[in-house]
Amino acid sequence: MSKRALMIGNSHVGAYMRALQQSDQDLGIDLECVAAHGDRLQAYTIEDGLFCGNFDDPDGKAARAGRKERARLADFDAILVTGMRFSIFHVTQVFRDLGVVAMDSARDHETAARNGMTLISEALLRRIIVDRLSNALAMDVVRDLRQATDLPIWVMCQPRPTRQVLVKGTRFGTFCSALERGSGAFISETYERLAHETCARVGAHYMAQPPETIDEDLFTDTRFMVGTLRPPFWQKNGRKVDFRHANARYGERMLTHLAAKLA
Amino acid sequence: MTHPYEDIPPEGFWRSGVVETDRMDWPGLHKPKFHLTHTTRVATAGSCFAQHIGRYLRLAGINVLDGEPAPKGMGEELATRFGYGLYSARYGNIYTARQMRELLEDAMAGRVDKRLFLTRKGRWYDMLRPGVEPTGCASLEEAMELRRAHLEAVLALISSTDVLVFTLGLTEGWIDKRAGKTLAMAPGVIAGRYRERRFAFHNFSYDEVLEDLRETLRLMQELNPNIKLLLTVSPVPLTATASGDHVLSASSYSKSVLRAAAGDVAAGEAAVDYFPSYEIVTSTAMAATAYEANLRGVTQEMVETVMGVFLVAHGLLDALAEMEAGETAHGARAGSDVDLRGLRALSGPAETDEEDADVEAPEDELICEEALLEALRK
Amino acid sequence: MKNPYSDLAPSAFWKTGVVQTDKTLWPDLFVPKFAIEPETRVATAGSCFAQRIRQALADQNMPILDVEPAPEALQEDLAREFGYGLHSARYGNIYTPRQLLELLQDVQTGTVREELIWQRKGRFFDMLRPNVEPDGCASVREVLELRRLHLARLRGLFETTDVFVFTLGLTEAWLHGPTGRCLPVAPGVIAGEYDPGTYRFHNFSHSELLKDLKAIRATLRQFHKKIKIILTTSPVPITATASGDHVLNASTYTKSTLRSVAGEMAMRFNNVDYFPGYEIVTTWARDGMAYQDNLRSIRPEVVADVMAVFLDAYGLRDTQDSARRDAEDPAPAEDPEYLDGQEDDLVCEESLIEALQK
C-alpha cells in the first residue's frame, strides 16, 4: 500500500513531482502538492485542518502542473516540506566571515584572520546557524503544521548546488571561499547536523541529502541536476542554466529513502 | 553547581534584605560587636548628628557621661548655646577625625597653644571650639585657662568611658599652618580673619582619615585600655564646599571617604564597631521623607527610626518599653511589638510641636557651626 | 570678617547648588577637565552601568570604539547575549579595578592560562569572562584561542583609545587561589563549582583599589601616552554580599569606597576625571524616584537625565534628536516586566546571584 503524503514547498518540489511521473517502479508514495515559487507561499493559512497556500494562480499554471492551492491534512499519512529557504546556502554565508577552531582554516585566530575570517565559538556558530535555519519560511510552515496535526512531518533536504557556483557569471563567493579554505567537509557536516537539530526542535524529521548525490561535500553531483530548468534561472553565455534544482533522479532517491522510513 | 551564596542569610541579598524587609526596623542590619547596657558608660562626640545619638541614648536610660555639665542654675537653652549638654564634654562639634586625634594629643600633653586663639571685636575665641563660647572670652588668658580645664575634663572623660560614640561629619577642614592644627571652623566665620598665608584648606583623604581614626583609638586605649569606639557617619550633607567642586559631588565624596574609612577601621579593630545610621537615612530605598525641606536636616521621624534600630540591636528598647509598660500594665507585653515611634513621646520634643510648629524649621534643634556657612553665601 | 567662603560660586553651597537648582540639568555639577570632541575615540568598560554610557555616546553618533563588533550574521539579541556591543570589546562586565588591571597585563604579556577555565557538562568556560559565551566552548583549546583573539584585539583598542571611560561597580570579588586571579563572578553562578580550598572571597579596600587604579593608569599610558580616563561609580546597589554584613551596609561600604577612590584618582591626576552620575542617581535631593521597584535598576528616564548631563558637559548632545527619540519611545516603565527590573536591557552577571537565593 502506498503512503499518501502532502508535499509543501516551492520550486524544489519539482524533483519529486517528476520522479513520480517518470519512475518506472512504484516508489511506495503518492504525493499531493501545495507549492508556489520562491516565497510566494508565505501567505499560507492552516484552518480547520485545511492547509491553504493562498497564492495567486491567475493563468492556472500551477493547476496545470498538478499543484494544488489547498489540501486537507487528514487525507495524508505524512507531510513533506522542502525548499523555502531551508538550505545550505544560508549556512555557507555564515562561513564567509566566521570560523571556529575546529576548522583547519581557523585553527587559531591568526590563521583565521589570514583567511579573512573572525574566530568565534562553535556554540555561537551553532546559534547563528540554528537561528537562520529556524527563520526560514519552511520552519514557519513546520511550526504551524505541528500545531495543527500529529502527522509525521519530514523536511526534505534542498539539494546543494552544482559546481556551477564556482564559475564566473554564476559565481557564489561563499562556496568559492569555502572550497579555497578547504572547509567544505566541515560546512557540510555542520549543515546536516544543525538541520537535523533545527527540525527536531520543531517536531519534524529531517531527510538529509543522500551521500551518493553529493560531490565533494558542498555540491550536488551534476547527474542529479541535469535536465532541470526552473525559474529563477540564470543566463550564462546566452544559455539558460539551472544549478540549484535537482532532477527526477534526485527526487526518486529521496522518496525511496523516505518510503523506507515511513514503512 | 555549588556556589558560595548558598549559606548567605536573607539579609545578605538585596531583594530580601532591602526590598522585602521592614524598612523601619531593618532586622539584621546592625549586629553589634559589643553590647551597650544600662550600666555602660557612654561618651559622645562628633558632628552635629551625634547630638541626636547622645539625646536618644540618654532617653533610653543609658549612662551617657557628661564631663563638663552645665553649672547649676543655668537655663537649659543658655546651656545649650554655650555648648553644655550637647556632648560628653564641651568640645563642640568635632567634624573631622583629625580634630579628634589632635584633641586627644593636646589633652594628653596638656598643651594649649596661644596661636590658636583669635579675636573678634576685642573678644577672644578658642579656634578649636569657637562655638562653645559664642560671645568669646574677655582675654586670651581666660580663653586659654578655659581650654586647659577643658583638656583636663576630656582626659578624665576618656579615662572613665566604656564606649565612645564618634560621628564622622566632614573631610574638608582648615588648618592653621603655623600651629599645625585643624580648626573646627573656617577662619572668619565665627572669629578671626581669613588669610591665605596662614590658613590652608585641606580635604582629608581616605588614608588620612583612616590613620587619624587608628591613632585616635590608640591614644584612647593608652588612657583606657578597655575603651571601645563606636563609629557612625553623619548623613547630613555639606553646607558648602571649598574644594572647588559642585557641592553635591563634594558632599558625596566626603561622606564616601568617611564611610569607607569607618568601615575599614571597624573591620580591622576588635575594639571598634560601626553603626549604619548613615545607610538607613541615605538609602535610596527610603522614601524622600528622610530629610527636611532644606534637604540637609534629618527629620525627627527618621532619627527615631535610626535610633530605634540602634536600641533594638542593643536590646535596650525592650528594657525601656518593659519599664514603661510595667508602670501601666504590669508588663503585659514584653515590648517586642512596641512601636518604636513611641520614642517620640519619650523624647519629649513636645515643645517643638508647640513652639516651633509654624516657625520655619530652626535648622533643627542641633547646634551646627558648619551650617553657619550658608549665611556666608553672597 | 574675611572668610574663604565669601567668593565661592553658588554651586558650592547646598542651598543654591542643590535645593534651589535645576535637578534635571544640574548646572555646573560636572565641569570636565578635558574635552571630548565628536571625533575623539572613546572606549568604555566596567560594570553593567557602563553599558549605559556607551549607549548614550553611541546614540550621539560618537565614534565609540568596538574592536570586537558583532558579526554581520548575528541578530541583535543573540549578539548581546554573547557579549557583543555591550562594551568596546567582549570583556563582559569588569566589576573591579583588579580585573581590569589583570586584563591589561594579560594583553601586554599575551598570557592565557588553562587553569582559568571552568568545566560544566562537558562545556568549557573562560573564568575571566564566562558570560560572553553563555553556552560555553567545545574544548579548552577553543577557550584559549578565543581568549588569544580577545587579547590581540584589546591591544589595538588600548593603542587607539583617546578617552577610556571606566565604571566602578563592586569591591566584593572572588579570587582563584591557584592563580590569584580576580574573577568577574563567583564560581557556580554561570559555571564552575565552589570549593573553599580553590576560591576565596575578597573585599577590596580603598588602598588596594587606589593602587590598582594607579597601575591601570600607568599601564594604559604605556599603550597610549595621551590616553585620558573618566571614572564613574555605578549607582546600582549590590545584589548580594558575601561579606557577612547586611546587604544595605555592605552595598553602602562598597559604593562609598569606590566613590572615594575614584574621587581621589581624579584629584591626583590631570588625565583622570570623575563624572558624578552616581550622585545624580543616588541623591535624596532628586525630584522623582531614581530606581525601579526592585530598588536596584535605574529608571530609564533617570539614565537619560544622567547621560544628558554628561553629554551637555561636553557639548555633545543633539537636543533635537534626543527630543524626537524621547517622543517616539514608548514609556518602558509601564511594562510590568520592566518594572520588576527583570527585563532591564543591561547584561549583568552579578544580578544572576539573585536567582541563587534559596
Image (cartoon, rainbow, N blue to C red):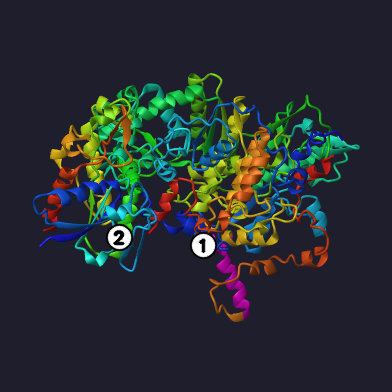
Residue C227: x and y in percent read 55, 23
Three-letter code for the amino acid on which mark 1 is drawn: Thr
Q: Secondary structure at mark 1?
A: loop
Q: Main secondary structure of the magenta part?
A: helix
Task: Pinpoint residue B246: horizontal percent, then vertical percent.
Answer: 70, 38
On the image, numbered disc 2 is attached to which residue?
Answer: A145
Residue matched to label 1: B21
Q: Is residue C125 visible?
A: no
Cβ atoms at labels 2 and 1 below 8 Å apart: no
The residue type indicated by label 2 comes to Leu
Q: Is residue B323 left or right of residue A45?
A: right
Q: Which residues are magenta?
A: B311-328
Q: Residue at x 20, y 57 (%)?
A: A31
* Placement of C36 over or under C51, stated as above or below: above
Find out whether residue B325 is within the magenta segment: yes
Q: Residue C335: which numbered mark, if any?
A: none
